[in-house]
Image (tube, rainbow, N blue to C red):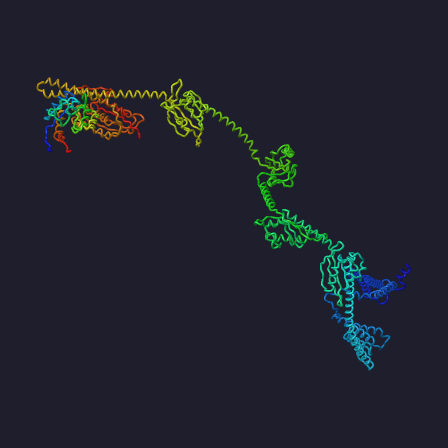
Amino acid sequence: MPHTPKPITILMADDDADDRQLAREAFDEAKLSNDLRFVEDGAELLEYLQRRGKYSDPASSPRPGIILLDLNMPKVDGREALTRIKLDPNLKCLPVVVLTTSKAEIDIIRSYNLSAASYIAKPITFEGLVEVVRTLGRYWLEIVELPDHDYVPNA
Amino acid sequence: MDEWLNSLTDAMGYVPLRTSGAWSQDWISLHVTSDLLLWLAFIALPIVLIAGGLHPFVRPYRRYLLLFGSLLLACGFTHLVESLLFESPVYRMLGVLKAATAVLAWLTVFALIPVVPRILSDLPRKPGSETIEVRESRQDRILIHMLAVLVALLAIVIRVALDPIFDNVHSYSLCLLGVTLVSWYGGFRPGIVCTLISGLLATYLFVEPRYTFALKDTNQVLGFGLFLVCSVGVAVLGEAQRTTRNRLNQKIVELIAATDTIGSEARKSDEVLSILDAFVRNAPYGIAYFDSELRYIRVNETFAKVNGKPVEDHIGRPLPEVLAEFPEALLADYRRVLVTGETLTNKVVFGRGLIWEVTAFAVPMGHGQRGLGVIGIDVTERHQSQEQLRESETRFRQLADVMPQIVFAAQPDGTVDYFNSRWYEYTGFPDDAPITEAMWRTAFDPESYPVTMEHWRRALQTGEAYETQYPLRRSDGVWRWHLGRALPVRDAAGIIVRWFGTNTDIDDAIRTAEALRVAASQQLQLTEGMPMLMWACEPNGACSYLSRQWIDFTGVPLEVQLGDGWLAVLHPQDHAAMAAAWRDAVAEVYGYDVEYRIRRHDGAYRWFAVRGIALRDEAGRITRWYGSCTDIDDRMRQSETLEQLVEERTAELNRRNDELQQQKIFLDAILNNVAEGIVACDEAGTLKLFNKATRRMHGLPVEQLPADRWPEFYRLFESDGSHMPVEHIPLLRALKGEAVSDAELVIRGEGIKDRYVLCSGQRLQTEDGRHFGAVVSMRDMTERREYEQQLLLTTAALKVSNEELEKFAYIASHDLQEPLRKIQAFGTRLADKSRDQLGDQGKDYLDRMLDSAGRMRKLIEDLLSFSRVSTKTIPFASVDLNAVVRDVLSDLEVRIQSTGGTVEVHELPSVPGDAGQQRQVFQNLIGNALKFTKVGVKPLVIVSATRFETLGLDIDPPLPEGKSGWRITVADNGIGFEKDYEEQIFELFQRLHSRSEYEGTGLGLAIVRKIVVRHAATITARSQKGGGAVFVIDWPIKTV
């Protein structure tokens, strides 16, 4: 099936509202026009990805092409969520970019071990954040080929 | 009588011859000398005769010799007296003497006449001269001729003497007489010689004219011619007579010889006959001679005696008549002999209890007649003895077979004819084989056989007992020595009839004897060879043997020292005591074990240890003393030195003993005062030693217990409290050879707390590897263990708290930073978005707010960093400081460029450490150096490193003692700081400047120091206000 570029939904999981706010503003500054969705913790993230609960409707909850994941979240934190995502055969192929305040080496290693695609420590300054987002966009959305979820391999 | 004798010597008027006439002295001497010589000769001759007459052959004729001798003596004395006449005219004596001599002479003549022929015939004839030769020798012929001449001369002389009577007639008469005489005895030739000489001389002397050879007239010629004819005729006749006489003499001599022979033969035959008669008469055999009618012609006494009749009764009577009971058979035999002429030999006749061996033979008597000769030998005894001999032989053989020796018997000539059964057993010869020399010789050794046979032959010859030794071969080929002995057996007459002999097996004896001899000689060699002086004494104490060593040593000959003489070579001082000791020993009072001095041949005395042993027989009596003397002189002399040495040694030993005692006390003190417990056991595993500490630990003393009871008794357990198996007990492990080190052991206490000990020990062994047990030292670790356990707990707690702290720090910083970030983020947004609306003051407030937030952020970061320094547990690795500084410089790139500074980095070493932390160190130090710069001066930072060793001892800051390592310096040309603050600046939150002058949290150097200290290094700062600063890190490195 020919690959038709579709606008990619970016799903971000972060429990901090401020960070969510900043993120949206950074995206605006970076002039990324992608559909940016937010979930507040790991559980919601999984619900969303698994089309459960309020996220059952695929139209209102489009499958993201990339996930930005904060590690420290209540209920189900990012690490757990990452684990589960990578265990789910449907969700496994989703690239997950960890975006977190922690610079702890252990978090970095664990994240990569859990097959996170990248690990980004949240910049301190806003400009930094904007730069990161811009770079993310360029890299993940323009350079990188994302897998097509509708693709079904010939059985 | 006397008167007559006297008258003999009377001179009677006669005058000595000397005085009469014309006797010259010469003639007197001649007469006297001749007479005296004659006298002496006539004495010598009788002596010679008598001496010769002593010859036994002449004995029968001695009286004639005496007679003749006396005649000669008488003649001699006549001559003597004649010589005396010259001095003393003893004519009467002379006359008497002459008369006596004349008588004696004619007596001799008459006595000798019958005897001389016999004497002459008896004279021993020369051998080979059986025929009597009467041939005249050449000498005789010459003698006759000379005699002829003498006679002729004599006739002339007599005629001259008779000339006054005859005058011119009868000139040749005496000559003719002489010729006749000569012819009678000499034959023709001497007669002619005499004729011629006498005739010529007579003619010359007596026929006129005298003293001429001329013959005047016919008468004279006739007379001479007649004389010649007659002389010749007489000579011829004389010759004829002589020849006849010679022949007659010859015949007579032969006849005499023959007669003699016959006579002697007759005498001999007479003698023979008489001998024969004597023989026959005396023969121990019976001899009888019969004629053809068996009449006794002759019989000897033996037969006659046997027959019981005198000899005369036998003669002429026939045998059967004389011996009535004569066996018919024998008579028949006799008659047969007479008829046939054969000889009947060895006929044994029994009669009258006697046994006779009779031989009868025919004797031809002439005329075809035969006589019978009978010889009979009385063999009764012989028979009997033969019987006896046979009997004894049988008995002997029986005996011989029983005897264990080999017995043989031989004939008198040496021929062996009997061996007993033992012989056959021994030699293996078949006992039915005939006994020959060749056979029994094979049992003899060929080498010694000739000698043996020589002995045998000699014994046979001399009849002496035979004894010799030789080897005999046994049936299995083994040679064994035998003693051969033989003795002769003689009969009544002393003649050897038999030899009996034995061969006794002496092989063992010989071997034993040989062995004994060898042993004896060896023993003698031994005693002679031994360095000790050997002696032997008889039971009575007299010395009977001294070894050569003794003799050589003393230099006194053996003979002198035998018996008691040996006492003399002893030292005078020892003499009495030793003599007494010897006496006692001999008397069996004491044994003999003494010491005394013996004088050496050079006079020096040496001490000897003497030991005597008594040899006893079965009854316990001493048969001999044997002893030896050993030279102990050196030893004796040394004994004094030795005693001295002993004293010294004893003193030294005592001293050593004291020392050892002291040592022991010291060691005991050590043992009992050490804190460790020491336990030792011996090689057998028996507990030997508990020091005081051990006793305290166990609360029990050393017990003799087997090892498997130790855990139970001494309450030994493993460190975890479990039961300790016996093999784990450290002492036993050490005993087995294990080098036990820090083995854990718990001694459970009763009423006291358990003691936890660490045991170390090993096997005890000497320098040369001998094992004699094991030792273990027990270090009481109870307290320390408690401390350790306490420490562990503390550490664990600490660790927990540390972790909590870190976690806290982390979370704190993280969570603290969160709002700060927000502040900064939103603040920036606000500054961006609402810049225009804020106004300047607003912006200023906002900037200050953001600035504070930023500072807080930095502080929190630094705090976090500080707390992380010790909690990070990355192990040290070798870090190349050059790389670290390069990283730091790249990080500080911006600052370096912005300040326009230079950082000079010299060669830096690699040091063990944490790379990240070291980066922090250099980042802070170099960062500071770039921060605290002088205004208008381009900052210069020099980073260098030097080894401790290359720096001098007086360097400032001083080097850490006793270590080697690197001194790393970071020097700058910045503003520096007052010396007083050199220490202070490393404190937490210490700032020397306000925030407006230089930014910073005050934590940088604190972090640096914390990191440096963690690396076991030291950091010091040196600076002056306005003169830059030097930060010195001394990094000790363990020498590899």
Residue appearing at x 62%, y 52% in the figure: B452
> B98 left or right of A77?
right
Q: Is residue B254 above or below residue B1038?
A: below
- Residue B481 coordinates in the image, percent (x, y): 60, 48
Q: Is residue B129 above or below residue B1013?
A: below
Residue appearing at x 71%, y 58% in the figure: B346
> B985 left or right of B568?
left
> B793 left or right of B484?
left
User: Total number of numbered labels?
Assistant: 0
Residue in the foreground of this view, choosing between B550 and B719:
B719
Residue in the foreground of this view, choosing between B974 and B324:
B324
Decide if residue A104 is in sight here: yes
Res B892 quadrant in image: top left
- Residue B399 coordinates in the image, percent (x, y): 66, 48
Res B764 quadrant in image: top left
- Residue B151 coordinates in the image, percent (x, y): 80, 72
Residue in the foreground of this view, choosing between B729 and B584:
B729
- Residue B1038 coordinates in the image, percent (x, y): 30, 28
Res B360 quadrant in image: bottom right
The C terminus of chain B: image quadrant: top left
Q: Is residue B233 above or below residue B420?
A: below
Q: Residue furthest bottom?
A: B218
The N terminus of chain B: image quadrant: bottom right
